[in-house]
C-alpha cells in the first residue's frame, strides 16, 4: 500500500510578548503569517522571520514553521 503526503499550507509563527502574569512571568502569543510557499527554503524563512522580529516593538521569542499536509492512500 503506497501512501503519499501532500503539503497543503505553510505558515510562519512568531511568539510575541503581550504582557506579564501575576507572578511577573512573560505572557507570549503567537502571531501567524499565512501563505508561506510550501516549497520555501527553511533558511530563507528563518531570515525573513529574523527581519520581522527586528521591526517588532514587542519582545519576541521562538519562531515556528507550521505545515498542514494531507495523507492519501494511492
Image: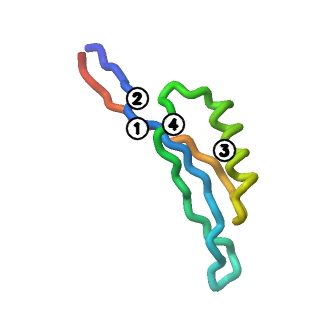
Does residue 59 appear to the left or right of 66 in the view shown? right
Residue placed under numbered mark 4 in the picture: 36
Mark 3 vs mark 2, foreground winner is: 3
- Mark 4 or mark 2: whose residue is earlier in sequence: 2
Quadrant in which the N terminus is drawn: top left
- Could you tell me how far apart the alpha carbons at marks 1 and 3 are, in whole angstroms? 19 Å
Residue at image x 70%, y 52%? Answer: 53
Does residue 66 appear to the left or right of 7 in the view shown? right
**Which of 32/2 is in front?**
32
Say whether marks 3 and 4 touch (CB < 8 Å).
no
Residue placed under numbered mark 2 in the picture: 7
- Could you tell me how far apart the alpha carbons at marks 3 and 2 are, in whole angstroms? 21 Å
Q: Which mark is residue 49?
A: 3
Q: Is residue 43 above or below residue 57?
A: above
Say whether marks 4 and 2 touch (CB < 8 Å).
no
Residue at image x 68%, y 49%? Answer: 52
Mark 4 vs mark 2, foreground winner is: 4
Say whether marks 3 and 2 touch (CB < 8 Å).
no
Identify the element where label 1 is drawn: strand
Q: Is residue 22 above or below residue 14?
A: below
Q: Is residue 57 above or below residue 12?
A: below
- Could you tell me how far apart the alpha carbons at marks 1 and 2 are, in whole angstroms? 6 Å
Residue found at the very far right of the displayed protein: 54
Does residue 22 appear to the left or right of 10 in the view shown? right
- Mark 3 or mark 4: whose residue is earlier in sequence: 4
Residue placed under numbered mark 1 in the picture: 68
Identify the element where label 4 is drawn: strand
- Mark 1 or mark 4: whose residue is earlier in sequence: 4
Residue 33: where, in percent of width, then height?
52, 48
- Could you tell me how far apart the alpha carbons at marks 3 and 4 are, in whole angstroms? 11 Å
Residue found at the very far bottom of the displayed protein: 22
Amino acid at each position: 500500500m503506497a501512501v503519499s503526503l501532500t503539503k497543503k499550507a505553510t505558515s510562519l509563527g512568531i511568539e510575541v510578548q503581550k504582557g506579564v502574569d501575576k507572578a511577573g512571568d512573560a505572557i507570549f502569543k503567537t502571531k501567524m503569517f499565512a501563505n508561506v510557499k510550501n516549497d520555501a527554503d527553511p533558511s530563507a524563512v528563518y531570515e525573513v522571520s529574523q527581519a520581522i522580529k527586528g521591526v517588532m516593538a514587542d519582545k519576541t521569542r521562538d519562531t515556528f514553521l507550521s505545515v498542514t499536509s494531507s495523507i492519501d492512500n494511492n
